[in-house]
Amino acid sequence: MKIHGAKPRSDPSIIKERLGQLAEAYAILQDVLHKMDGTQPGNPYGGREMAIAATHLDTSYLWAKEAVEQS
């Protein structure tokens, strides 16, 4: 379905905006994980489970970033 007047998903300004939103959400989630773990951002996580969650978050961010860049 084509929406008349809408920019295509591949428009550079839309991609830039989406990458910015994605990076902002990623930073917020990283801060939340550190807060829940009781560690400071930039330092290793104290618990194994939180470290695994952070690894999954990193992987999710990279896959989402790749998907936005390829759209």
Image (cartoon, rainbow, N blue to C red):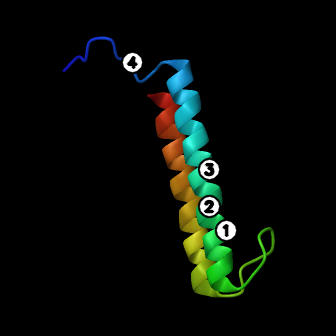
Residue labelled with disc 2: 28
SS state under label 1? helix
- Quote the CA–CA distance across marks 1 and 4: 33 Å
Quarter of the image that includes the C terminus: top left
**For residue 53, which quarter of the picture?**
bottom right
Height in image: 21 above or below 7?
A: below
Circles 1 and 3, Cβ within 8 Å, touching? The answer is no
Residue at point 49% right, 46% down?
A: 64
Circles 4 and 2, Cβ within 8 Å, touching? The answer is no
Residue labelled with disc 1: 31
Q: Is residue 40 left or right of residue 67?
A: right
Circles 1 and 2, Cβ within 8 Å, touching? The answer is yes
Quarter of the image that includes the N terminus: top left
Q: In terms of sequence position, does the residue under pointer 1 or pointer 4 come before the other?
A: 4
Residue at point 57% right, 54% down?
A: 25
- Quote the CA–CA distance across marks 4 and 2: 28 Å
Residue at point 56% right, 43% down?
A: 21
Circles 3 and 2, Cβ within 8 Å, touching? The answer is yes
**For residue 44, which quarter of the picture?**
bottom right
